[in-house]
Image (cartoon, rainbow, N blue to C red):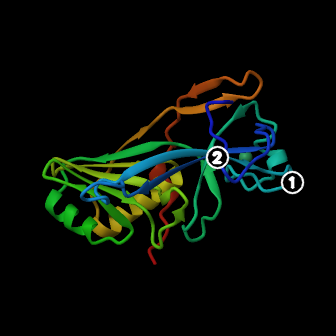
Amino acid sequence: MSMFKTPETYKGPIDPDGGFLCFVTCWRPRAGEDDADTPGEKLQMSSYIPVAPDHVCLCGSGKTFGACCQPKRLWYPVCPNPGIPGEVGYSLLKVQSATFTNVDGASVRAALMDDLRLHCAEDTLERAFWIYEGAPFIQTPHGIMCFGDIELQHNHTLHITALSALRMRILLELLREDCGDLGRPKMKYDPVQVIDKRTGKSVTLQQEAPASPAARGRRRKR
Ligand SMILES: [Zn+2]
């Protein structure tokens, strides 16, 4: 398991039957540049979280670890959900993107620039780029935790990337609040890297698109 860095906070052995790998993306200013904030730098990190068999499973199922992911043959990674009201804990890592085409770039840009949950890391004619940090943002020793990206390409295409289905839902809700109805995005689900516990080898799984994302119901705006 040398491909994964052990976290500074966890010193014990890494056991696929004893916990989860957790992926976190952070953003921080890039030291020594004229404008350290733009674009700044992003760090991808993994850490190991030990979980007791009778503790609630980190995959989000609501079952205990011993009755859920512990006996599974494949080891699925998770990502954290701090700072999202009513959604504490973790979810399975499911990297995905949503693309809206033919958006009104000028008004989308103006609306997103005003949103305090977003950090603008790049702003040129060809590309504007925001990192979703949440409000209040979450500081880690490595920078501010980022939960997803929003990219405006050539002032007409909006591309959203998130680590999990929950994060994507939060980002799409934010867009709807800020920009109104942008139509139906084209969704893309990236393959997930999991580990076969028996062989220790990495396995690439194709993600299945949810059967009907629209039918799952939206949370009400506050
Ligand atoms: Zn589970």
Which disc number belongs to residue 54? Answer: 1
- Nearest-to-viewer mark from 1 and 2: 2
Give the structural element (helix, strand or loop) at label 1.
loop
Around disc 1, counting alpha carbons within 10 Å, would you say few (fewer than 14), some (14 to 19), or many (20 or more)?
few
The answer for how far apart the CA atoms under marks 1 and 2 are is 21 Å
Residue 135's x, y, as percent? 45, 72
**Location of residue 96 (image quadrant):** top left
Give the structural element (helix, strand or loop) at label 2.
strand
Residue 17 or residue 219, whichever sits in front: 17
Q: Which residue is mark 2?
A: 47
Of the two numbered discs 1 and 2 on the same chain, state the one appearing first in sequence. 2
Residue at 43% x, 55% y: name it: 27
Residue 59's x, y, as percent? 68, 49
Residue 32 or residue 8, whichever sits in front: 32
Residue 90's x, y, as percent? 63, 55
Does 52 sit above or below residue 199? below
